[in-house]
Image: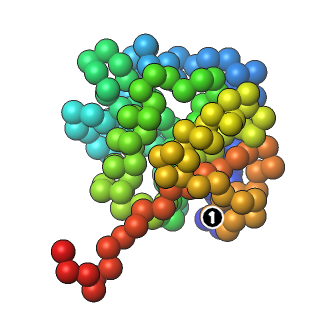
Amino acid sequence: MVKSSLQRILNSHCFAREKEGNKPSATVHASRIMPLLSLSANLVYSDNRLNVTEELTSNDKARILNLQTRLTDAKRIHWRAVLSSGSLYVEIPGGSLPEGAKDSFAVLLEFAEEQLHADHVFICFHKNRDDRAALLRTFSFMGFEIVRPGHPLVPKRPDACFMAYTFERESSDEVG
């Protein structure tokens, strides 16, 4: 049930911009600042580098999150994600990554580990993107690994490429 709910959410949210012909979205560009709060969203977390809101949905097994990182006073980057069963699934929007995307994603990873206590962060992007090789290199450098089709934690999406970042947890046996 959780997997089918996740599939439905990813189908409705992931790749929406790609289906529109890779048109740039105002929420993607770091040069534009979009208000993160709306009438249908709740503030989940906020600090000097990150605001996170949750879209209200009828699904209690998966949460849709909007994450906005503040790199400078003028530069903000927006990511959409789904949190389900201890994993965060992040949509990589169409078009080139904005300047500062690596730093922004580092903030996102820190939030996923420390605040959400996620086990994994998955990124998904359209397989046929022109910048696919650059994305694979960039996220591999950050510690992500390619997820093979058929992996139990990702939906069956032949048009999508998934990569995963797994958080290493300290065992309780270790003395710190």
In-image side of 150 versus 76 (left or right): right
Is any atom of residue 4 visible in this view? no
- Residue 160 relative to residue 75: left or right: right
Taking the view exactly as shown, the residue that stands out farthest to the bottom is 173
Q: Which image quadrant for residue 124?
A: top right
Query: Looking at the image, which residue is at 62% across and 64% down?
Result: 153
The residue tagged with tag 1: helix, strand or loop?
A: loop
Q: Considering the image in quadrants, where does the N terminus appear?
A: bottom right
**Residue drawn at x 31%, y 27% as measured from the top left:** 70
Residue at x-position 40% and y-position 67%: 168
**Front-most of 119 and 137?**
137
**Type of the residue with mark 1:** Leu
Which quarter of the figure has residue 97? top right
Residue at numbered disc 1: 153
Percent position (x, y) of residue 154? 66, 59
Place of residue 52 in the rendered image (x, y in percent of width and height, measured from the top left): 36, 39
Which residue does the image show at 67% across and 68% down from the upper left? 152
Q: Quadrant of residue 145?
A: bottom right
Which residue appears farthest toward the left when viewing the image? 176
